[in-house]
Amino acid sequence: MVDIATRVWNHKWKIDPIVRSLIDTDFYKLLMCQSVFRNRPDTRVTFSLINRTKSIRLAELVDEGELREQLDHIRSLRLTRGESTWLRGNTFYGKRQMFTPAFMEWFENLSLPPYHLEKKDGQYELTFEGTWPEVMLWEIPALAVIMELRSRAVLRDMGKFELQVLYARAMTKLWEKVEALKPVEGLRLADFGTRRRHSYLWQDWCVQAMMEGLGESFIGTSNCRIAMHRDIEAIGTNAHELPMVYAALAEGDEALRQAPYDVLADWHEEHDGNLRIILPDTYGTKGFLEGAPDWLAGWTGIRVDSGDPAVGAETAINWWKSRGEDPSEKLIIFSDGLDVEKIKELHGQFSDRVRVSFGWGTMLTNDFKGLVAKDALVPFSLVCKAVAADGRPTVKLSDNPNKAMGPAEEIARYKRVFDVGDQTAMKVTV
Amino acid sequence: MVDIATRVWNHKWKIDPIVRSLIDTDFYKLLMCQSVFRNRPDTRVTFSLINRTKSIRLAELVDEGELREQLDHIRSLRLTRGESTWLRGNTFYGKRQMFTPAFMEWFENLSLPPYHLEKKDGQYELTFEGTWPEVMLWEIPALAVIMELRSRAVLRDMGKFELQVLYARAMTKLWEKVEALKPVEGLRLADFGTRRRHSYLWQDWCVQAMMEGLGESFIGTSNCRIAMHRDIEAIGTNAHELPMVYAALAEGDEALRQAPYDVLADWHEEHDGNLRIILPDTYGTKGFLEGAPDWLAGWTGIRVDSGDPAVGAETAINWWKSRGEDPSEKLIIFSDGLDVEKIKELHGQFSDRVRVSFGWGTMLTNDFKGLVAKDALVPFSLVCKAVAADGRPTVKLSDNPNKAMGPAEEIARYKRVFDVGDQTAMKVTV
């Protein structure tokens, strides 16, 4: 039987909204947002969407009107009562009331600020300006909207069964990954694929397939809405935007050198246990760790997000040893450019020396490579980053010079201040 | 939204019926049934289910209670008003009123006769006795029930996503076949896969995928219910059971030799055009054609259903030539052991010399080989055949000695009467 009401209801939508909830975002965004709301609520920032894969000409693929409708729809969203209840009442990382009443009250009244959209050279220039806590919440939904509109554009002319077979192939491909990972003893793996997912429904499917296929080895998802709906752990800690904005705001070189530690000092006050994860690569991992205060060595773990991951992990292990810490009690989270072979390789290499876990992104939730004609769904590298704070440009270096962002003279200054020597360039695919 | 009524309704079923309609059967069964109803309505026959793949121990896989419930459900079925309307009103092979009012009235009042079921040596002995027109309609539903119960038994312990991935893999596999056949110019292909299908829903999916993927090259299905629901052609003409029963009823060797021609003489009166298809292999193609009356050479085509298909096709072409017929106006239907490579090969070999079409069975609707652990869904060879008529055993020889059926002394007699010389044995997989 057709459910008539459902069908009529579906017809009433002017669009098929991609992002339908303010918590269809990464958990670490909300954690960072609360930290920013507490520590830097009035900082004004600009976030900008950047397609690093110039060969994908987004403005030719994706209709501007459709993009505006999707973005306008996101601006109309408010935190629902059930979402608020979940954020207030749920246990995150073993802790009740992770989000303070003051933050929740602010979040309950939030609507996302305006966006600015232009076409240029076959690409979209999409920027968001306003106070940091508001603007930062645009990052994930903006990326998810562009990614899914691109998927829809590519799939538009396909037949019904052709589409079903496409998803059948994608399911088969994912399940083969699940089957390859199932025998890996002691594996701990989370979904970090919200920002570059093929679509919301596909991410939700991937998460459920991992729940069934990997059981205990699948430890949760970064996506709050999916975590809530599927009753699993929401996973994530912090990201580059914190040191990038703190650094941009720093007055002079000495303050700049201190900025990344200031971020973690604030975080240290707010969080403990498994939320104390260092992301050391914003301005070069090596220099960051060498200059780090001793209290940071007491933190639970390090997230390796750029450069050669095995080198990053060895650097972390050696650093803990040099500070008198026992690496076997520490956690290394790998979250850059992962797929099955890399996960198995890193797990084999490090799991008997440190605790290891994986945040699996694009190749989990958007691996449609080879599944459509002309490989039109091949993953590409789209980011949405803070580019300015209180009128000053931000800079990111990372452990891969191909991921560096910011004005050339500022990059040069940061390299000098943070004493970043030679870096090995690695290809950025996603 | 959940449709509550649908959910509650689904709960009310004691079983999930496999065969839900008396026209969930092959079209040629109905054509033959009408012919039998007209010419031999009182002949008493026994049909028997035979699993030629002894390694598949059906009685250990399939629960007897479940099997009885499914068979009892089939006995409870009556032709519905809509089905009757379709059979009475539809155009089959370009002809209106294919089914006579007398036949339709009989069919509208039909319920299938009792069955007899026993377990023996890990197999089911399933037999049907009664008048020919009634009993013959058991063949297809009985096969479909056993095939699908076997599928269900194998899938019983699989997880929800594991199942979804299994069907994703099956869809992908089928679609690859569709894509491989799409470029074949002038291809004409029908679904003949009802009897050995994985399940009803899967056959229905395969048909729809072929409709979308092959367009005009997909000419229809043997399954009446699917033809009706999907608004496509119902395809089929006649089968071995006609000569087998006619032969069993023949008094003496001379009448036996004539029996296969008597069948087609009756058919000649009833049908013309594309329904005049000779199935010559019941007692050896070569002898059948050599002894055939001239009016048979005027028929539209020949179906090649056993032996090496290329040899069968050459035999047919040479026979037409020897009778002064133009092979390029004739139709050869291949319907035995087909898969993509064989279809492409035969099409390439014969389509510029005769009209060619394909009736694709098991490897279309039940190719789950390699898709589950221990290959537990590998196709197997299940048949349901007339084994006796008015108390006498039936015999089938075909062009493959591995497909011969009947008591040894009767097989020997038939070989003598029909002058069947040496035959090449070919492996029977499905």
Image: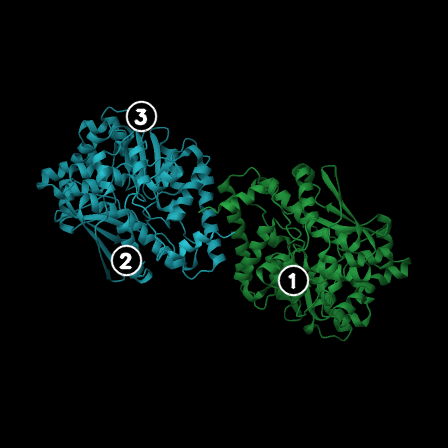
Chain colours: A green, B cyan
Q: Nearer the viewer, mark 1 or mark 3?
A: 1
Q: Helix, strand or loop at disc 3?
A: helix
> Residue B339 placed where, x, y %?
38, 43
Q: Which residue position holds label 1? A: A85
Q: Is residue B139 above or below residue A280?
A: above
Provide the chain ID for the residue under circle 2: B
| Residue at image coords 72%, 57% | A107
Along the line of sight, the residue nearer the viewer: A84 or A145 = A84
Pointer 3 or 2: first along the chain: 2
The dot on residue B68 is 2
The label on residue B329 is 3
Q: Nearer the viewer, mark 2 or mark 1?
A: 1
Type of amino acid at the residue the image marks with label 1: Thr
Chain letter of mark 1 equals A
Q: Tell me which amino acid carries mark 2.
A: Arg
Number of numbered discs overlaid on the protein picture: 3
Picture layout, residue A170 above or below residue A243: above
Residue B140 locus on image (x, y percent): 28, 47
B269, above or below B402, in the image: above
The local secondary structure at tag 2 comes to helix
> Do the residues at discs 2 and 1 belong to one chain?
no
> Pointer 1: residues within 10 angstroms few (<14), some, or many (20+)?
few
Quarter where residue B224 is shown = top left
Say yes or no: labels 1 and 3 on the same chain.
no
* CB contact under 8 Å: marks 1 and 3: no
In the rendered image, the residue lying farthest to the right is A252
Residue B57 seen: no
- Residue at left 22%, top 38%? B105
Disc 3 is attached to a residue of which chain? B
Badge 3 density bin: few <14, some 14–19, many ≥20, Cα 10 Å: few
